[in-house]
Amino acid sequence: MNGWTTTATVALAGGLGATLWGAATGPLHRRAVAQNLASAVTAPALLLLAQGYGRPAYVDLALVLALLGPVGTLVFARLLAGELADGGQSPGGRGPTLAVAAYGALVVVVLCAVTGPSRAMVKLLVVGVLLVAGNLIASKALSGGFGTAGASAGKNAGQERESNGRG
Amino acid sequence: MRPWRAVRASGEVTVWWAALFALWLVLISTVDPLELLVGAAVSLLGALAARAGRRAVHDE
Amino acid sequence: MTRRVRLLVLALGGAGLAALLVAACLDLPGFGRARHPYGTRAVHASLARHTANTIAAVNFDQRAFDTLGEMTILFASVLGTVVLLRQSRDEKRAAPEAERVAAPVRRYALLVLPVAVVTGLYIVAHGQLSPGGGFQGGVVAATALHLLYLGADYRALTRVRPVGAFEIGDALATCSYLVLGLACLLAGAAFLANTPLPYGTFDTLASGGTVPLLNAAVGMEVACAVVVLLAHFLDQAVEIEEEGSRSG
Amino acid sequence: MDDPLIVVTLLLVAAAATAAVAVRDPVRQALVLSVLGLCLAVLFTVLQAPDVGLSQLAVGSALTPLLLMLAVRRVGRRAKGTTGTTGTTGTGDGEREKAR
C-alpha cells in the first residue's frame, strides 16, 4: 500500500458505500442522484489506483467511466423522466454533487502536478474535464433535463392518462 | 447556395477532425507513423459521426 | 426408456461429472501466489510473440479458437433477438414523437458522441498494448451512437443508424475472423495459429502478428451487434405498438 | 500487500449484490445494478485484471441499464395497453405507487 492506494481505499469505502446506500433506499429521485454520484466517486478512485500501481495504462478505465458513467445516468433520466418529475421535484443532491465534482477536480489537479507537463498530463486533464462536466450535466438532466419545465412533463402525463383511458 | 454549403460542411468536418486527432495524440503512448495513420482514419470517422449527429438533431 | 433407467443414466452421468470436477479441483495450482504455472507460461508465450498485453495474447493467439466460439455466441444471440423481436402481425408501427431535451444535455450529447467513438476505436486499436480490446472498445463505440437517442430523440438516432448496414457489418466481421483463421491454414499453419505475419516491434501498433487483426474483427462485430441489438429493443420500446392498445 | 483495499472492495461488492437482490422493483434494481457494476469494476482493477474491469465498465455503466429500462418500458406499456396485467409488473407498479 502507498499513499495513493490508501486514499483510494478511504474514498471508495466512504463514497461508494454512501452512494450504494443512497441507491438502495429512499425515494426514486434520490436513488438516481446516488447512482450518478457513484460513478463520479469511482472514476477519481480509478485514477488514484492507476497512479498507486504505477501503471499509466489503467487510466483508460477512468477514461471509459468518465465517458459512459454520465451516459448511464442519462439513460435513467431519459426513461424515468415522468416518474422523476412526479416525485415532488425535490432539488436535493446539489451539495453532494458539487462536493463530489470538487473532489474529482482536486484528484485530477494533484495527479497532473505529480505527472508534470507531458501528454500523459493532458490525458488526465481530458479525463477530468469529461468527468466533472459529464456528472454536472447528468445531475442537471436528473432534475428536469428532459421535458423541461412543467409543459412537456404535463404533456407526457396527459398522454399517459389518455392511453390509460383507452386501455 | 450549394458551393457555400459544401465549404461549410468540409470546414465543420475539418475542425472536428483536427480536434479528434489531437485527442488521439493525447490518448496514445508512443508516437509512430502507423499510429498517426490509424489516428487520422479514426478521427475522420469520428468527425463524420459528429457532423451526422449534429445534422440529425438540428436539420429537421 | 423407463423413468428408472433415465434416472440411472442421469445419476451415472452426474457422478462421473462430479468425480472429474473433484479430481480437477484437487490438481489445481495453489490460489493467490505470486507465481502461477499458467500465468508464467502465458506471459512467456505472449512475450515470444511481441504482444504487450498478455490478456490479448491469450484471447486472440493462444485461445483464438475459444474467442471464435464466444464471438459466434454473440452473433447467434443477436440473430435470435432479431427473430424474436420482429414486428408481429398484431402489432403496428407508430411514428416516434419528438421529445424536448434541455439544451445543455443536447449539447453534451453532440460533443461527447465523437469523443466516445474515437475513444472506443482507440481501445479497439490498442487492445494488444494496453487494457482493452475488441469487445470493450466495440461496446463503447456502439453506446456512443445512442447518445443521439438520449440527448435528442429516437428520430435523430434513426437518421444516422442504417440498421441493415450494421447487420451486414456484423456478418462481415464474423466472416473476416473465420477468413483470417483460414488464411493461417493456407499459410501452412494450424487454424488461427499466429504464424503467418511478422511479429513486429514490441509495444507498437503493428506488433503481435494476427492479434491486432483478429482484435479489429471482434471490435467491429461487437459494435455492430450491440447497435443491432439496441435497435430492436428501441423499436419495441418506442415504435411498435400492439393493436390492442388502440382498439381495446 | 493491498489487503485492506481488497477487503473493502469485496465488502462493497457483497453489499451491492445483496441490495440488488433485496430491491424488488425492476427500475430500482437497475439503479442498484449499475452501482454493483462499478463495485465489480473496482474489484477487478484491484485484483490486477484491468481488461475484465474495462469490460465491466463498458457493459455495466450504460448498456445494461439501457437494455433493462427499455425492457421495463415495453412491458409496462403492454400491461397498460391490454387490460390484464401480469403478476410481476403488477407488483412493480404497486411498489412504485407506494413510493410516490
Image (cartoon, coloured by chain):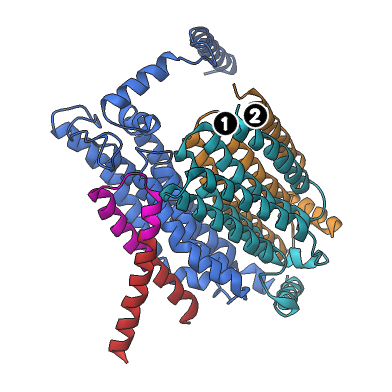
Chain colours: A cyan, B red, C blue, D orange
Taking depth in this image into account, of B34 and D35 the one nearest to the observer is B34
Q: Is residue C121 magenta?
A: no
Tell me if I can see residue C76 in this picture.
no
Query: Nearest the camera: A27 or C43?
Result: C43
Q: Amino acid at mark 1?
A: Val
Residue C170, can we see it? yes
Magenta segment? B22-48
Residue at point 26%, 40% (across, down) = C178
Question: Residue C103: where, in percent of width, then height?
Answer: 60, 75
Main SS of the magenta segment? helix
Query: Neighbour class for label 1 at 10 Å: few (<14), some, many (≥20)?
Result: many
Sequence-wise first label, 2 or 1: 2
Q: For residue C31, what is the image quadrant?
A: top right
Q: Is residue A59 left or right of residue C163?
A: right
Q: Return the x and y of residue C83 as percentages of the image width and height.
A: 46, 53
**Residue underneath mark 2:** D5
A49 or A23: nearer the eye?
A49
Q: Is residue B22 left or right of residue C113?
A: left
- Judging from the image, mark 1 belongs to the subunit labelled D
Numbered badge on residue A7? none
Mark 2 near mark 1, Cβ–Cβ under 8 Å? yes
Which one is nearer the viewer's eye here, D71 or C128? C128
Q: Position of residue D47 (x, y in %)?
A: 55, 28
The residue under label 1 is: D46
Task: Identify which residue is drawn at 25% across, 54% down.
Answer: B37
In the rendered image, which quarter contains the N terminus of chain D?
A: top right
**Residue at x 20% of width, y 36% of height:** C182
Distance (Cα) linking label 2 and label 1: 7 Å
Q: Amino acid at mark 2?
A: Leu
Q: How many numbered discs, if any? A: 2
Quarter placement of the C terminus of chain D = bottom right
